[in-house]
Image (cartoon, helix red, strand yellow):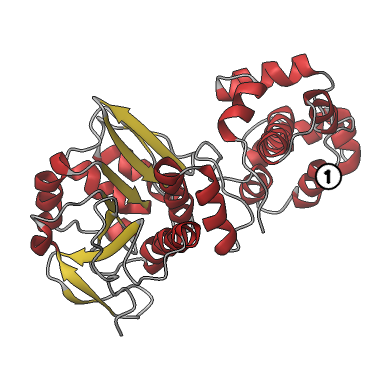
Amino acid sequence: MNALAPTPMARTASVRQIVFAVAPHLVLLDACGPMEAFWRAELEMRSMIGSQSEENVAYRTRVASVEGGVLATHVGLPVVVERLDALENEPIDTVIVAGTFDADRMVLDPALINWLKRAAPRIRRVCSVCVGAFYLGAAGLLKGRRATTHWRSADEFARCFPAVEVDPDPIFIRDVRDGRAVWTSAGVTAGIDLALALIEEDLGHAVAMQAARRLVVFMKRPGGQSQFSATLDAQHVAGGEFDALHAWMAGHLNDDLSVERLAERARMSPRTFARRYVEAVGRTPAKTVEALRLEAASRALSQSRRPMKRIALDCGFGTEQNLRRAFVRRFGVPPLNYRERFASLRVG
């Protein structure tokens, strides 16, 4: 089954050729998700210019591996791909290295690494999804750069490539050095967010948002958004002991969330609660409260135009000044700057 068959060759010079460089045991969504985003942008551009032709007007996507032919994927669906060496003289705009399954035992293909080394100087953008970042690292394309990958593989990635500034938190990172941008993203669905950001860079915000709408994506997530949900993370590390409390906290951010009040909810003395909470979660209750409030505030800033004062009150910061201090401490920018950078329209 040719599930990832290339689209027809475009004759328009402005068409950007996107090549997905893949290896055996491909994580299918790492490639298919971004491909769908590019195709939806293609449809939007055709609609805008009124093109009824089968020829591409914005993007042509191709999928290639070292050997070409039938490629195994980790879900068992074989796909037919091209050979990378057949693309040596092609005008490639962007390369996206997709991830493979079971990163803990992943063996990198030296031939794919060498192809990336040769091809990268002539390619405008080099990107990775999930553990595809390991290939960019091995090819020397991330040295001295800030990069991300799937949170489960971040520690191993940092050990393998000490010259890379690894940040496991963002959904994707765009690092520009010497006039060249390298993009890395977190795992699986984060590849769609990466593709939407690339589309926005190429074709503008409106087209990217329409592509998201066509994909029935609730919203276009900003790269700086965390891979983690503060609530989910707290519940995970607590092992269930404080799940009900965390759910209550997330729904009462503008309430009194002092240790005394939380201890009362947990039916413990403040001293016992504070000790057991740190033992279970690995941080103080106050740190969790701040993380939950910051997550809610950042979501409100990026998804709405609510006044800053209203957001500060709703999220439990009380005043705009407290909200500003917390944002500068956590994100390095004040709330207004965060909104300007990450604000996106609701779609659906």
Of residues 155 and 212, the one nearer the viewer is: 212
> Relative to 131, is 74 above or below?
below
Q: Position of residue 164 (x, y in %)?
A: 29, 32
Quadrant (top left/top right/bottom left/bottom right) for the C terminus: bottom right
Q: Position of residue 77 (x, y in %)?
A: 35, 80
Q: Is residue 85 left or right of residue 320?
A: left
Of residues 42 and 32, the one nearer the viewer is: 42
| Kind of residue at badge 1 | Gly
Of residues 250 and 42, the one nearer the viewer is: 42
- Secondary structure beneath dot 1 equals helix
> Relative to 223, is 47 above or below?
below
What residue appears at the point 51 percent right and 50 percent down from the top-left corner?
Answer: 207
Q: Is residue 99 visible?
A: no
Q: Position of residue 330 (x, y in %)?
A: 59, 24
Q: Quadrant of residue 83?
A: bottom left
| Residue located farthest toward the bottom when viewing the structure as drawn | 1
Q: Residues within 10 Å of mark 1 (few under 14, many from 20)?
A: few
Residue under numbered circle 1? 251
Of residues 348 and 202, the one nearer the viewer is: 202
What residue appears at the point 32 percent right and 73 percent down from the top-left corner?
Answer: 4
What residue appears at the point 68 percent right and 29 percent down from the top-left corner?
Answer: 287
Q: Is residue 239 visible?
A: yes
Q: Position of residue 141 (x, y in %)?
A: 21, 38
Q: Is residue 226 left or right of residue 46?
A: right
Q: Is residue 344 left or right of residue 46?
A: right
Q: Is residue 205 left or right of residue 314?
A: left
